[in-house]
Image (tube, rainbow, N blue to C red):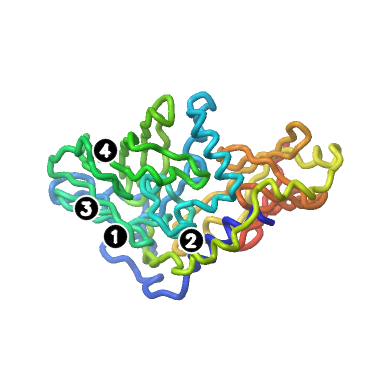
């Protein structure tokens, strides 16, 4: 059960309470004849003719929020980074940013599907863009022509300047506190991290985001990830403040990831082989259930394989995870989630409920 501890505690720290304006109609946005938000309408323009990114956005990054280095090969990650990520996995992520009530720093660019970071409000002016997050952090992106400092005093959110390249906003950032993680898995960075973001709004309800990371002390080459965001209409961002008692709760955060295997039952290979295959999430989807005001979602894909006598799960390209048996049909270890196999499918078990996946026909 320790593998689900990270997800459970973060959920408990960030529980949403009743709030105002969750169903408040957003004024001034395009709507269809039946009154629904028209998310396919043309993107708005600011008075200066630039694309207007202003609005409340619901980010979606199930792959890179969990593992920002999912597309890198092991030799493209410095050995000390691989060792540190493995240690953080073994420690059940107890030094994670949200666990310690610290800002996510550069991880906000790709964070999604996580309490306190899935939404952001963008406020755009000709000289400054501000990004506001539910956990009360903010970013300032200066468009007044200033250059980045060559030797900045490190800060949690770094320093950002932007410019327009046609209809694309290009943001350069530097000066991040080296103690922040790049994702929930625990990939680190150094003071040499530079981040380049590109934002496009091809239609009213869609924001396309590309993020390039460059940190030669930690990774052998720069790499780019793509994430997206949907316009969150007729709702409001809920304030999420980390529990003041979080640090005291850490005294109960004991054990390691390896503890689960000590009493793991031995499951016959022929039983494990029955479970291999590709599984597709069925409605109602987890994303719709966990985020108030979600404008839409799609099902997740989970691949189950048998490698070296163990079941291995990989969901949406986030990276492979060994599954630890609790019984012949129930396992844990899938990014802190449980997996229970049933006839013709499986449940992915989350604190918000069990989500049904159907096996994809061969």
What residue is rendered at 58% in x and 38% in y? 319
The CA distance from mark 3 to mark 1 is: 16 Å
Secondary structure beneath label 4: strand
**Can you identify the residue that label 1 sits on?**
29
The percent position of residue 248, horizontal first and vertical second, equals 51, 66
**Can you identify the residue that label 3 sits on?**
124
Q: Quadrant of the N terminus?
A: bottom right
Secondary structure beneath label 2: loop
The correct choice, above or below, for 18 with respect to 95 in the image is below
Q: How many marks?
A: 4
Q: Given this view, does label 3 or label 1 mark the residue nearer the observer?
A: 3
Circle 4 residues within 10 Å: few <14, some 14–19, many ≥20: many
The label shown at residue 291 is: 2
Which of disc 1 and disc 3 is earlier in sequence? 1
What residue is rendered at 27% in x and 50% in y? 53
**Can you identify the residue that label 4 sits on?**
172
Which of disc 3 and disc 2 is earlier in sequence? 3
Toward the viewer: 167 or 123? 123
């Amino acid at each position: 059960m320790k593998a689900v501890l990270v997800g459970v505690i973060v959920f408990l720290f960030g529980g949403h309470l009743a709030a105002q304006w969750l169903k408040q109609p957003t004024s001034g946005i395009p709507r269809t004849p039946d009154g629904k938000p028209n998310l396919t309408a043309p993107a708005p323009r600011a008075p200066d003719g630039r694309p207007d990114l202003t609005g409340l956005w619901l980010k979606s990054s199930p792959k890179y929020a969990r593992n920002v280095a999912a597309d890198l090969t092991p030799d493209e990650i410095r050995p000390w980074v691989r060792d540190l990520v493995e240690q953080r996995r073994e420690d059940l992520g107890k030094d994670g940013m949200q666990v310690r009530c610290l800002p996510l720093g550069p991880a906000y660019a790709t964070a999604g599907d996580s309490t306190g970071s899935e939404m952001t409000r963008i406020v755009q002016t000709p000289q400054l863009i501000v990004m506001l997050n539910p956990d009360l952090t903010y970013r300032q992106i200066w468009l007044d022509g200033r250059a980045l400092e060559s030797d900045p005093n490190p800060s949690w959110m770094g320093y950002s300047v932007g410019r327009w390249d046609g209809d694309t906003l290009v943001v350069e950032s530097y000066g991040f506190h080296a103690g922040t993680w790049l994702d929930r898995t625990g990939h680190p960075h150094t003071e040499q991290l530079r981040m380049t973001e590109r934002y496009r709004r091809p239609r009213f309800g869609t924001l396309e985001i590309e993020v390039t990371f460059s940190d030669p002390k930690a990774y052998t080459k720069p790499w780019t990830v793509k994430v997206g965001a949907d316009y969150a209409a007729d709702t409001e961002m809920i304030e999420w403040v980390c529990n003041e008692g979080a640090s005291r709760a850490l005294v109960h955060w004991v054990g390691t990831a390896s503890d689960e295997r000590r009493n793991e039952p031995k499951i016959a290979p022929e039983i494990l082989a029955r479970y291999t295959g590709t599984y597709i999430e069925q409605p109602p989807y987890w994303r719709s259930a966990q985020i108030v005001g979600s404008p839409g979602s799609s099902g997740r894909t989970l691949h189950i394989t048998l490698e070296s006598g163990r079941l291995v799960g990989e969901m949406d390209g986030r990276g492979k995870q060994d599954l630890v048996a609790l019984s012949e049909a129930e396992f844990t270890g899938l990014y802190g989630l449980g997996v229970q196999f049933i006839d013709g499918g499986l449940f992915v078990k989350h604190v918000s409920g069990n989500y049904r996946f159907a096996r994809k026909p061969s």
